[in-house]
Image (cartoon, helix red, strand yellow):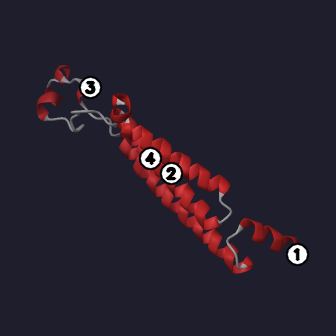
Amino acid sequence: MENLIANFNYVIVVILMMIGLWSMLAQKNLIKKCIGMGIFQTGIILFFISIGAKNEAKVPILSKVVAENPSTLIVNDYANPLTQIMMLTAIVVGVATLGMGLALAQKIYRQHASFDEDDILENQRK
């Protein structure tokens, strides 16, 4: 139980990713699929942020003292900003992907008057 509490963020990641994956695969409604994709992306972003987190890490901005004497620099004391930067990019890409998916769903709704996949496929066969 202690291990579960210590890794609670990873449990939440798995739950979010499974909900999102289930929604994308099992749902027939296009809007629900888009919402599932957003939930799945949130789980992935939380996972990468969790990996990059360090307890008691310093901000990676070096002072003059460290810059003048680089032998005093202990790399493990500083947080790696790469995961945060990459996840900011992933958030932007996720918002653009979600926006594109919703725009396509709106276009499909205008043509077929339904968000349901089965109705759309049946309308296309006619």
Residue 41: which numbered mark, if any?
2
Of callouts 4 and 3, which one flags the residue occurring earlier in the amino acid sequence? 4
Residue type, numbered disc 2: Gln
Q: Say left or right for 88 vs 64.
A: right
Residue type, numbered disc 3: Val
**Relative image position of residue 79 (x, y in whole percent):** 28, 35
Of callouts 4 and 1, which one flags the residue occurring earlier in the amino acid sequence? 4
Of callouts 1 and 3, which one flags the residue occurring earlier in the amino acid sequence? 3
What residue is drawn where x is 38% and y is 42%?
Answer: 49
Quadrant location of the N terminus?
A: top left
Asked whether disc 4 touches disc 3, contact meaning CB atoms under 8 Å apart, the reply is no
Picture quadrant where residue 83 is located: top left
In space, the residues marked 2 and 1 are separated at their CA atoms by 36 Å
Task: For label 3, count other residues whose C-alpha is less than 10 Å away and answer few (under 14), some (14-19) or many (20+).
Answer: few
Q: Is residue 8 above or below residue 101?
A: above
* Residue matched to label 4: 45
Q: Is residue 119 above or below residue 65?
A: below
**Relative image position of residue 123 (x, y in whole percent):** 81, 74
* Residue matched to label 3: 75
Residue 126: which numbered mark, if any?
1
